[in-house]
């Protein structure tokens, strides 16, 4: 599978990342609604909170867990597609793995952050302490992210594929930080389209996600192609 790094393809991948990232956030908020019986609140593009009625619930960790469960389900669906020999579906698998920021999950766990370690602290902090949670969390995340990354690498046929893979792993993070967390975050905090309806998600976030979904569908990074076009003999 030869991964293109044209401007069109990179924009398509970023659009997919924005859509899948918001679905990750909505997985959190959907479980907040189930566990607490009230809507949570999406404060920013990557920050959410439970409602006041949820303060005394012992199950709020399930809402924190829901986002990674969604992301890993998508990542491992991509991994399983890569394991099949039908190369036509490998571009779709690439979107599922990279679109769910598989490397970012590993990097965040390595520096002691992320939903996974937050859940472990909620459940195990009195028993194994903060460093125990960090080490166990990193081990769990590594076991869930490294196999899909390695399988993706195995399927790539690019020249200098190590650098191509690293670019797709690393570059989305600063782009998301500047565009989503800073620019869109500033617009959101200004109050524009900040009305929260279903699941406590602002209208601006819904509209942005819809626009990115349309862009991804139009540019279609997961399009089916003959094996010869994928670099498969």
Image: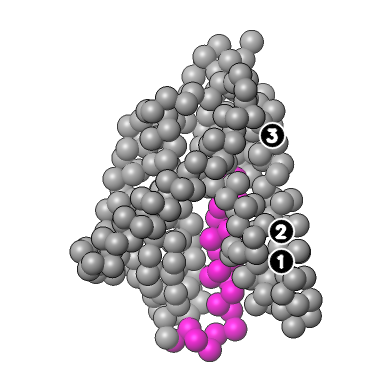
Give percent across and percent down for residue 183.
31, 55
Most distant residue in the bottom direction: 56
Near mark 1 (Cα within 10 A), the count class, few <14, some 14-19 or many ≥20, is: many
Nearer-the-camera pick, 30 or 215? 215
Near mark 3 (Cα within 10 A), the count class, few <14, some 14-19 or many ≥20, is: some
In the visual, does 94 lie left or right of 183? Answer: right
Q: Residue at x 44, y 61 (%)?
A: 46
Q: CA distance from mark 2 to mark 3?
A: 20 Å
Q: CA distance from mark 3 to mark 1?
A: 26 Å
Near mark 2 (Cα within 10 A), the count class, few <14, some 14-19 or many ≥20, is: many
Q: Could you say whether the residue bearing mark 3 is in a helix, strand or loop?
A: helix
Q: Is residue 168 above or below residue 113?
A: above
Q: Is residue 56 above or below residue 65?
A: below
Circle 3 residue: 151
Going from the N terminus, do you reach mark 2 or mark 3 first? 2
Q: Which residues are magenta?
A: 53-75
Give percent across and percent down for residue 43.
37, 69
Verify CB contact (< 8 Å) between mark 2 and mark 3: no
Residue 130's quadrant in the figure?
bottom right
Q: Is residue 65 magenta?
A: yes
Give percent across and percent down for residue 200.
35, 70
């Amino acid at each position: 599978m030869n991964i293109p790094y044209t401007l069109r393809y990179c924009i398509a991948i970023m659009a997919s990342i924005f859509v899948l990232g918001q679905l990750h956030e909505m997985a959190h908020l959907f479980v907040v609604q189930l566990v607490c019986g009230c809507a949570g609140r999406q404060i920013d593009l990557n920050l959410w909170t439970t409602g006041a009625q949820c303060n005394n619930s012992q199950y709020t960790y399930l809402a924190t867990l829901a986002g990674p469960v969604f992301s890993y389900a998508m990542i491992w669906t991509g991994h399983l597609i890569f394991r099949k020999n039908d190369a036509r579906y490998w571009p779709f698998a690439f979107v599922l793995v990279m679109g769910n920021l598989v490397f970012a999950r590993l990097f965040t766990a390595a520096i002691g952050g992320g939903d996974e370690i937050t859940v472990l602290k909620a459940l195990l902090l009195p028993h194994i302490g903060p460093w125990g949670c960090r080490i166990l969390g990193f081990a769990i995340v590594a076991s869930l992210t490294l196999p899909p990354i390695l399988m993706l690498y195995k399927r790539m046929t690019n020249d200098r594929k190590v650098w191509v893979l690293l670019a797709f792993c690393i570059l989305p993070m600063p782009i998301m930080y500047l565009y989503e967390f800073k620019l869109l975050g500033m617009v959101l905090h200004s109050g524009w389209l900040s009305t929260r309806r279903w699941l406590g998600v602002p209208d601006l976030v819904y509209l942005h996600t819809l626009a990115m979904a349309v862009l991804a569908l139009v540019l279609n990074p997961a399009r089916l192609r003959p094996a010869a076009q994928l670099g498969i003999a």
